[in-house]
Amino acid sequence: MATIHLTKTSAKFIIMNYHKERAGNEMKFLRKLERNFGKYAVPNLMYYIILMYGAGIVIDLVMPGLYYQYLCLDAAAVLRGQVWRLVTFLICPPSSGIFFNLIAMFLYYSLGTTLERVWGTFRFNLYFFSGILFHIIAAFVIYFLMGVSVPLTPFYLNNSLFLAFAATFPQMQFYLYGLLPIRAYWLGIFIGAEFLYEFLFGGLIARICIGLALLNFVIFFMMTRNYSKISPREIKRKQKFKSDMKTAQVEKIRLTHHKCAVCGRTEKDDPNLEFRYCSKCEGNLEYCMDHLYTHKHVTKEDLE
């Protein structure tokens, strides 16, 4: 399992950086949704999810097999009236064994609360609940297309949480089994590659599960990319900037190095002119030899 290693200073820097980049990348309708429905968001959502995981661990210890028999997401069973499965499928323990389950619960709680703190309560709620919705849609699409009911757990939902974290904080460091340090970016790449392999070489059911269950992450990833960098206007602006910089470099070569503070003459006016600084003047002013001894000394009050 992995644990997060993050100092308070680095967390503050990453959060400030994220908010600065996010402002220009999000779609306007998302901000409208937050204005209209933000009051309904559930604060500290991961706390309640972790409680459900805990209940799942207890149920698995006391009554093994009960989850898959009565609680997992089963489209056929839901259509027969077992509508509670639309919610109870979330209580599946995130790992196996009490020790690894506790570590996994701590990990997912850390991921979720960090994302909520950075994204905001409404955006995190929207991401998590849309993941639940896409899981439910996947179960029913498989049932109606294939004629079979495939029991689904929140496995992909948990992984979509981690993928979102890795995409938001790619440089965050984890410790695998508390020993091996690894960046979130590489863990995200590994998980993404594994799902891509299953999607490409698995059957239709696997493709539907992965494609729909991880759709919340795909939407999140697409919405948070800065496409302005590849827009024609931005490309033209960069080309103009490079051209202006080259022009500025040429002009810089032509700039003068000395200028008299009184008459304004430079070395270009007369290559034989000599310039000196006046030790009694404030502001590091230069004077040509004609005015070095005749100028009025500049004080701090004159500069103000």
Image (spheres, grey):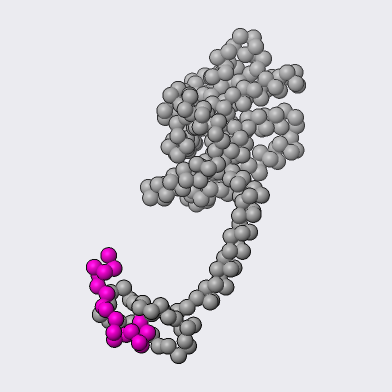
Instruction: Decide: is 297 above or below 105.
Output: below
State yes or no: residue 301 in magenta: yes
Q: Residue furthest top?
A: 81
Instruction: Decide: is 73 above or below 274.
Output: above
| Magenta-highlighted residues | 287-304
Spot occupied by residue 92 in the image (x, y as percentages of width and height): 54, 25
State yes or no: residue 82 in magenta: no
Spot occupied by residue 221 in the image (x, y as percentages of width and height): 59, 39
Viewport quadrant of the C terminus: bottom left
Rendered image quadrant of residue 214 = top right
Instruction: Decide: is 262 above or below 69.
Output: below
Q: How many marks?
A: 0
User: Which of 84/27 is in front?
Assistant: 27
User: Which of 148/280 is in front?
Assistant: 280
Q: Residue at x 75, y 38 (%)?
A: 201
Rendered image quadrant of residue 261 = bottom left
In this picture, residue 189 sits left or right of residue 301: right
In this picture, residue 24 sits left or right of residue 8: right
Q: Residue at x 55, y 68 (%)?
A: 248
Per the picture, the main secondary structure of the magenta-coloured stretch is loop
Q: Residue at x 38, y 79 (%)?
A: 263
Instruction: Determine if residue 54 is in view.
Output: no
Q: Residue at x 66, y 44 (%)?
A: 193
In this picture, residue 65 sits left or right of residue 194: left
User: Which of 169/279 is in front?
Assistant: 279
